[in-house]
Image (cartoon, helix red, strand yellow):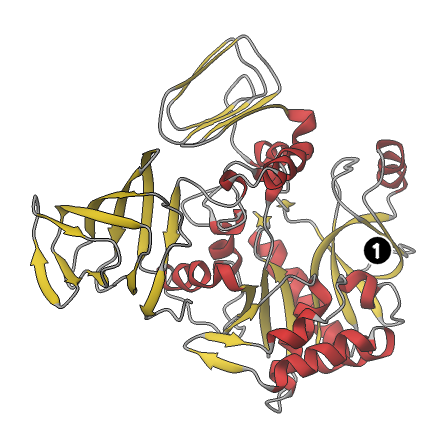
Amino acid sequence: MITPIILSGGSGTRLWPLSRKLHPKQFINLVNDTTLFQDTILRLPTNVADPLVICNEEHRFLAAEQLRQIDRESNGIILEPIGRNTAPAIALAALKFINNGKDPLLLVLSADHLIQNIDAFHKSIEVAEKLAENNKLVTFGIVPDKAETGYGYIEADIDNKTDYYNIKSFTEKPNQADAKKYFDSGNYLWNSGMFMFKASIYLQELEKYEPEILSSCKKSCQTEYKDKDFIRLNNDEFYKCPEQSVDYAVMEHTQDGVVVPLDANWSDIGSWGALWDAKNKDKNGNVSEGDVILDNVKNTYAYSSNRLVSVIGTSDLVIVDTQDALLVADKKYSQNIKNIVNQLKKSNRSEADNHRKVFRPWGYYDSIDADDGFQAKRILVNPGAKLSLQKHKHRAEHWVVVKGVAKVTCGDKIFLLKENQSTYIPKGTIHRLENQEKIPLEIIEIQTGDYLGEDDIIRLEDDYQRT
């Protein structure tokens, strides 16, 4: 049976400021009411096994919650302590099944792709399945519709019209002149980063060409253990694993690689320009989302998360306004947003990693205001959820309930707070906030103290195994 492997480790920095390190693009509803991660799972054929998800440790609760939202089960969520690219990630998935005496066909998919022609996608999977059953290593090549510099290319041995082709070569993202040459030749496909092969065949080829990767992954799995749906590795061993893509590690070397062409309105949504391409536009070629007013504007993407954005007399721009950051860029330079993100990281700015609204496994908090010595947050706790039992060295907290009923632990006291009631948590006091009701709990929290960073949390008990 086919087992989907969902690779969900990307950070999506080219879609900053919407996509950020701790809440990347695959977990955002960029195209419709569901996220790219959820869409990846929802468009799977009905005759496949539950997917196995591979994601970063810091994204584990996002993945689990988004599976729950669409009522889908998984074969587990493997947690990578650090990203080592796709070759090790796929090896971990293959080893999980081989170590349990199984050898399924692995359908390897990225969690952040857009595929609009689902029927064409399913037909390509049927073609790939027959090839993979015969020990071929299959990649899916996107039929190009333009000379694109943002994708890698696969040179195919297109000698006649068939359902698949032998692979001649892989090429990195080209310059514009080479991209046009590839497109005009008709012999090249875009490299989608999607694959299908037997778990055993992939491991066999990996041992042949990158034995150090396989060895590290095997050692990482030797002491793995399950924590609810999460599969935790031997982190020390995985840190030693070389970083390599499956293309470099296996597909460029194997003698059994083939490519199945896929013409399914595909995009990796790798830039604001790509997202603009994928969206419905008005008569002037504009995409506007949120509270946006346009006047004499053409071919522009304008997004507002929470306030009015007005644009006059421009064209070919990307304008993205979030609660804590504003981006204005020429659409043709939208691939360069990573340069801004790198500057933010060098300056140790929180906007590189977090939004103002930060999601937690129990709900979220929204930092409303802050200045020297104080910070205000709006906190939402999901029904049945609770924060960790904790204390702080540097801050005290004032809580006001605005919706729902809060169960509060403060020192040796446990009590309930209803709407419009409040309490005070002194600095150093052990405390906990809990929602035992069937509706969300919302509170306003005012923090006061000489240091208000998120690392001033000493957790004594936690349902989510956070340290």
- Disc 1 marks a residue whose amino acid type is Lys
Where residue 271 appears, x then y in whole percent? 63, 37
State left or right for residue 181 relative to residue 323. Answer: right
Give 37 or 59, whichever is nearer the viewer. Answer: 59
Quarter of the image with the C terminus in it? bottom left
Outermost residue toward the bottom in this view: 101
The answer to whether one can see residue 243 in this image is yes
Where residue 416 appears, x then y in whole percent? 8, 59
Give 456 or 59, whichever is nearer the viewer. Answer: 456
Quarter of the image with the N terminus in it? bottom right
The residue depicted at 52 percent of the width and 73 percent of the height is 47
Give 448 or 307, whichever is nearer the viewer. Answer: 448
The residue depicted at 50 percent of the width and 55 percent of the height is 37
Say which quarter of the image contains residue 417.
bottom left
Where residue 300 appears, x then y in whole percent? 56, 21
Against 336, residue 352 (above or below) is: below
State left or right for residue 407 relative to residue 238. Answer: left
State left or right for residue 164 relative to residue 114. Answer: right
Q: Residues within 10 Å of mark 1 (few under 14, many from 20)?
A: few
Against 76, residue 273 (above or below) is: above
Against 354, residue 59 (above or below) is: below
- The mark total stands at 1
The residue depicted at 76 percent of the width and 72 percent of the height is 131
Q: Which residue is mark 1?
A: 161
Against 7, residue 93 (above or below) is: below
State left or right for residue 259 relative to residue 392. Answer: right
